[in-house]
Amino acid sequence: MLPILDGLFNGISIGSVLLIAALGLAIVFGLMGVINLAHGELMMLGGYGTFVVQNVFKELGEPWFNLYIFFAIPVAFIVAALMGLILERSVIRFLYGRPLETLLATWGVSLILQQFVRSVNWVMVIGMGVFCLLFFGAMFFLRRLRIGNWALWLMGWLSLGIAIVSGILIGKTGQEALTKAWFSARNVDVTAPEWLRGGVPLGNFQLPYARLFIIGLTIIAVVGIYWFLNASDWGLRIRSVTQNRTMSSCLGIPTAQVDALTFALGSGLAGIAGCAITLLGSVGPNTGQNYIVDTFMVVVVGGVGNLLGTIVAAMAIGILSYLIGSGTLAVLLVQVEPLKPLADMFLFFATTSMAKVLIFALIIAFLQVKPAGIFPQKGRTVEL
Amino acid sequence: MKSQSIKKRQLLIEAGIVGAIALLFAFLLPAFMSAFRLKLLGRFLSLAIVALGIDLIWGYTGLLSLGHGIFFALGGYALAMHLTLQLPDGELPEFFSLYGVSELPWVWQPFYSFPITILAIIIVPSIVAGLLGYLVFRNRIKGVYFSIITQASLLVFYNFFNGQQKLINGTNGLKTSTQNIFGVEAGSEPAQVAFYQVTILLLILTYCLCRWLTSGRFGRLLVAIRDDEVRVRFSGYNPTWFKVVVFAISGGIAGVAGALYTVQTGIITPSIMEVAFSIEMVIWVAVGGRGTLIGAIIGTLLVGFARSLLSEKFPEVWLFFQGALFLIVVTVLPNGIVGWWREEGVNMVRSLFGLRQEVVTYPSIDEAPEVQKEREEIGS
């Protein structure tokens, strides 16, 4: 009995990481039909946010350090949500109705973000500040004066040039503090507060507190999102736009604002997920890539526009991949004589990477039965 | 009758241009370029083949595959396996002894023969693509779902190849540069030049195949599927099979490209199936212009050389540049360079020389300022 319990717990804890990461993705995809390939990088930003908060609290000393995680969560949320908002306002809103192009654009953003955390330093930040000041300042005045687009283009290139030149000039002064990369390309480690280390002993294995904390965080996030979508005014608007965009627009719902808000919310959830995964391992520029495909599978299996589908899919994928990957299933099946060949097959897939192979095969098989996920959206459309 | 003869003449002119460019690349360029650049060019040309395959399914059929790395790698592995088996009788490839394998796995057996290898390079990726395509398209899964599923299957194959040390040497991959092909070492200068010329030949063949596929009824159906699949279905066609076939063809093309790329790089590892590389293939097509075959080739060469130049000088800037490229192509140049040229560039050059603009309808409609203004406001 114990191995099953162990497997179940570990599976749920993998599933809860998947769920918290996929939650934001599912909401955004359900509402706008937009696949955000930069979602993993938003998680990474959340992770780096946690790292920064941790370093600040390390300075403050012992009693505070134990509590840093509670400050890190909102910081991670805000950092990722702001990034998401910028992304939506500057790129994605121009691409609605072109989902494949959005996919490519968000991939471009994810590449930029990856390289950004590798090489960000004060010079770069100053350069970006100069650019924003010049460009958006110019935009403000040009709008007032009603001068055409060409001036804006010119100003864009001009401010880019000035920003780059000033960045190079500052870099030339050779101040170590200015040119040193903040995080560098190496992974950074986040130390969990003391009360999250160790675990509850249960039989001959233990439930790590960090895992329990993630499960708790996931539950809070899911309940919070459920409440927000079902009990608040903006949640109502989001749901109505999800169901029928044109009709909602006709009834006076500001769909552009709803889109921006939802995207920021989904990105913020990615930030919280990033904060959670710092408890499981180090954070690096490539962290986001490890999660992105798994979380998409959750969304594909769960179907869009339904939180329950996402929850069920995340848990099912998490538990199955643990049971297969750790070999628990194979060990269990060996005990039953007639199922021996099946056990041999599971033994073949009993590593983490091979488990992914089998899980994918199962997902493809599942999609043969239910192409639109566990809970498909009902509607009178030929497009399904 | 008259239009047919014009068409024939146009086709002849096109064939002449293609042949001339091919001869230029095959014989003239090797005389001028350094060996290093020529090797790069050879690789980019083989990548252009896979770009043609992607253009076929994305540009013409509207299916964005993020998993072409699978087919690319399958083709590459097929040829690499054949090269690895160029050993004295009864000897096993070296790496097998490391993992304690004493007998050649059955998967390897057919690759002793060169013709079967050539067939496998095309057929195996096609079958995998066809099967995956059938399972996906049969349920009318499309759009971003299709992209995500191809991406996931790419990751699955990556994991699978990485995990199989005993079968195909896992992460270390197969090295081809020190093996013999037809008695010549594959990494040596004459063999590389031969590969370069074979690449050009196959690129032309692929171009002709794609040109033929996209120009007839089949091509028009593909475009119809891209533009309105539901309407195609209501007109009595079953789009599933067209999509399966075109995906399989595209997979086969990617296999050929992978084989050529492998012998020119000298090694194949599962890292060729990384997620980033497969998405990069898409951007080549997007830069050149999707829905235009020549665009796919131009885009690959441009991005390839930009990459090699930038990452030689400033390795850090390359990712920024690539990311910006994705953003710019999608927002500012949705039809790519060739698309832009056909739509606006031609008219720009004409007006530069004071010629009349080419008009679609009548000059009085196309050039009337009121109509222009209205068109801008509506945002055609």
Image: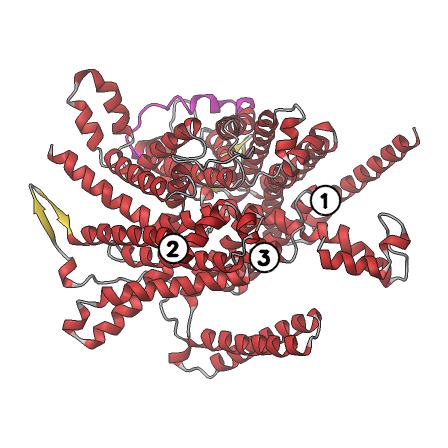
Q: Is residue A62 above or below residue A219?
A: below
Q: Is-magenta flag for residue A167?
A: no
Chain bearing tag 2 is A
What segment is highlighted magenta in the picture? Answer: B98-117
Residue B371 location, x and y as percent? 82, 57
Is A336 positioned to the left or the right of B358 in the image? left
Q: Which numbered mark, 2 or 1, is in the foreground of this view?
A: 2
Query: Does residue B345 appear anywhere in the picture?
Result: yes
Q: Residues within 10 Å of mark 1 (few under 14, many from 20)?
A: few
Q: Secondary structure at mark 3?
A: helix
Residue type (three-letter) at the residue carrying disc 1 = Phe
Q: Secondary structure at mark 2?
A: loop
Query: Which amino acid type is marked by label 2?
Result: Asn
Quarter of the figure that contains the N terminus of chain A: top left
Q: Position of residue A367 (x, y in %)?
A: 42, 30
Mark drawn on residue A94: 3
Residue assigned mark 2: A286
